[in-house]
Amino acid sequence: MAIAIREVSASKPHADDVILEAGKESLRILFLVSAHNGLSQRAWIALTEAGHDVSVAVVGSAADMEAAVHEHDPQLIVCPFLKQMIPASIWSRRRCLIVHPGPRGDRGPSSLDWAIELGERNWGVTVLQANDEPDAGEVWVTRGFAMRDAGKSSLYRHEVRHAAIEALVEAIKRIVTGKQPPSTNHSVSSAVTGRARPLMTQDVRTINWESDSADTVLRKIRAAEGHPGVLDAINDTEFHLFGAHAEGALRGRPGEIIARRTGAICRATVDGAVWITHLKRRDRAVERHMKLPAADALAQAGIEVEAPEIAVPIAPSQTADDTYREITYAENRGVGYLRFDFYNGAMSTDQCIRLRAAYMHARARRHTKVIVLLGGDDYFSNGIHLNVIEAAEDPAAESWRNLGAIDDLVRDIVETDSHMTISAMGGDAGAGGVPFALAADYVVAREDVVLNPYYQHMGGLYGSEYWTYLLPRRIGSARAARLTAAPFRPVGTYEAIRMGLIDATLGAALGEFRARTVRLAEGIASDGLYQARLRDKGRRRALDERTKPLQAYRDEELARCHACFFGPDHSYHEARRRFVYKLGEPGTTRLESHAGNPQHPTKGRPMSLNIPALEASFDLVAQHGEELMDEFYTRLFESAPAVVPLFAGTDLHHQKAKLLRTLVLVRNSLRDLDAIVPNLRRLGVRHVAYGAQPAHYSVVGEILIAAMATVAGPAWRSEHESAWRDALAIVAAAMLDGAKAAHSTAAA
């Protein structure tokens, strides 16, 4: 049934006033998203396969949303991943469904974080209708799931994604058939299992290395996985911690780095140790940092780690859970299982080289007949490592090395004549990760996996991994051209099977997928057709080689990539930079921040301000100005006692009023910050006289954000925190410019 809006008045139809036209079941749906992530892509796939016409708008402001709604004129708006409130001008006129990663009654921006931190055994996803309160609208569908001992990001990509798709599909079926939300039906249970919770701040996440157990440290880092990470200090430098893994044997002084392994560091706890794979240095007023392998992040910060590099064999004698490994190899019943679990699926030059060596080891084992390539649970592979490339001294040269290393690995798999090979995709794959998987003889996937077999969205990067051979070999040249060119779109597993991109799906849950992959591999190894399969495989590879050598494909691809890396068009480098620094999506206000040279580490990189989030969040606390100032100065003096002498002899009541007036000025000038830059520079000059140091600015900014979050309560959202961090960085940069000028004048 199609839905047509019936106007109740000449100017303002209501969201619930719809007429159902019999005989049609396709809706015109618009996704409003902060980013088109794995969940929104999987939702797009599910609803498109159900016959709906789905458009996606990546939005950064209320104005962006209104423009998208005007352009697409949707019958239904769906928000699988939206960090800000939908304006009343939209939700009051059109039905808007919000996907919230919490059970019925749960509210707040840190839903999964709290579920992990509090040890919840069961959790859920709720599809509700937008209104004027965050996560408080009518509930259409809720789906529960059992929690797994994993990080927030992994839960989001598996349990949350699966439950969200089921709930969303059911909710839209109800809308199509003209049913009301079950919460309006008194015969349907509407038991509330969650409650409103505030934004989880770093005060809650803080690790006490002198008292927290290894399990506590693991839980805290897992609850902050993906974003924001746990803020901690290493050698007096602040980093956000990510990628925590248990360690069963190593011991040391609590908090000390006691070992290194393939870019990760191991830190001792009071009763054991944990591995931490990635760090992100804390952003400062005029600095932006990105997430990197821990050893790289420490090296960039000038921190030398003296702990030993402790290697482990890829074929462990103990269980794999006893320590951290990126690559493992095991054998059973004629099958070799090569598992590689790289953070977020990115494969650096070093990781490609190590994985290639492990593959050559597996290929040399003559008593096995099948090799299974098992990526990580969350990602099979996403190709080259853009963050490591961005951090390199010469990003163009590192891009070239990285692509060459992954090409070497793919070629070894394609040319394997001793084993049958299976790529088992339990997680998503994108860019180079898709042709990497296609190098194997058989390709299977978990049902919920999303594939993005294209590169050119990354600033026109052509890509390699022999994709011009491997994609057409499976789906034909015409279809390969469509999949890898704009408009770019994700591919679901059912469509992938229909077109021949993959061979089969083996269940939706991780456990089922692993078990069925083992049965498939052992069946191929033991069914008596091994030699016949090898001969057929050899004949087909020889024919392909005579038609066009593999080296020719590689040479052509790399020639195109060389132009992207080293040519005059810098689109790839700019797209990569925006990606790794998570700069704003199109549609947000863009300001040039001081960065990219020794004086200004981010010059030339656009910093985005989310103005609607800034205005809305300030308005939450504006009516509690005195409370905000009391909270701020209490936190400031407790957290940074070194600044207390700066306020000696100051009338604190008067000082609080001045700070509040400055914040009001900033809030009222957000749409034209250039107009108040002179005032901010003069303020920076005055702060030199007060004794303020550059290091104080970031401390004050973080404490102010924490105070605002406390005063705002459950209405405060993660997007507000991010928006104010960016805005205060601009303010601090202007004040520091004034302070620098004052110092220069004094020196002259």
Image (spheres, rainbow, N blue to C red):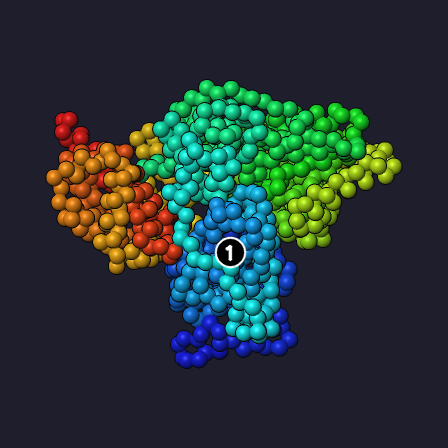
Q: Position of residue 277 (x, y in %)?
A: 51, 32
Residue 118: image location, x then y, percent: 49, 47
Q: Is residue 737 above or below residue 513?
A: above
Residue highlighted by disc 1: 102
- Relative to 685, residue 161 above or below: below
Residue in the picture at 79% in, 25% down: 366
Instruction: Determine which quarter of the picture holds residue 369.
Output: top right
Tally the marks: 1
Residue 687 can be seen in this image? yes
Q: Residue at x 13, y 42 (%)?
A: 650
Q: Residue at x 40, y 44 (%)?
A: 204
Q: Is 353 drawn above or below residue 433 in the view shown?
A: above
Kindly state the secondary structure of the residue where label 1 is placed.
loop
Quadrant location, the N terminus: bottom right
Answer with the quarter of the image where residue 583 lies.
top left
User: Does residue 454 appear to the left or right of 713 in the view shown?
Assistant: right
Mark 1 surroundings: few (<14), some (14-19) or many (≥20) residues within 10 A: many
Name the one closer to the observer, 465 or 657.
657
Residue 423 placement: quadrant: top right
Pick the residue in front: 289 or 636. Answer: 636
Please state which of residues 113 and 722 is positioned toward the viewer in this rendering: 113
Amino acid at pointer 1: Gly
- The answer to whether residue 553 is seen in the rendering is no
As drawn, the residue found furthest toward the bottom would be 9
> Relative to 383, is 226 on the left or the right?
left
User: Could you tell me residue 422's position as x and y percent?
Assistant: 73, 38
At which x and y percent is residue 86? 42, 62
The residue closer to the viewer here, 75 or 317, is 317
Residue at 45 percent across and 35 percent down: it is 212
Q: Quadrant of the C terminus?
A: top left
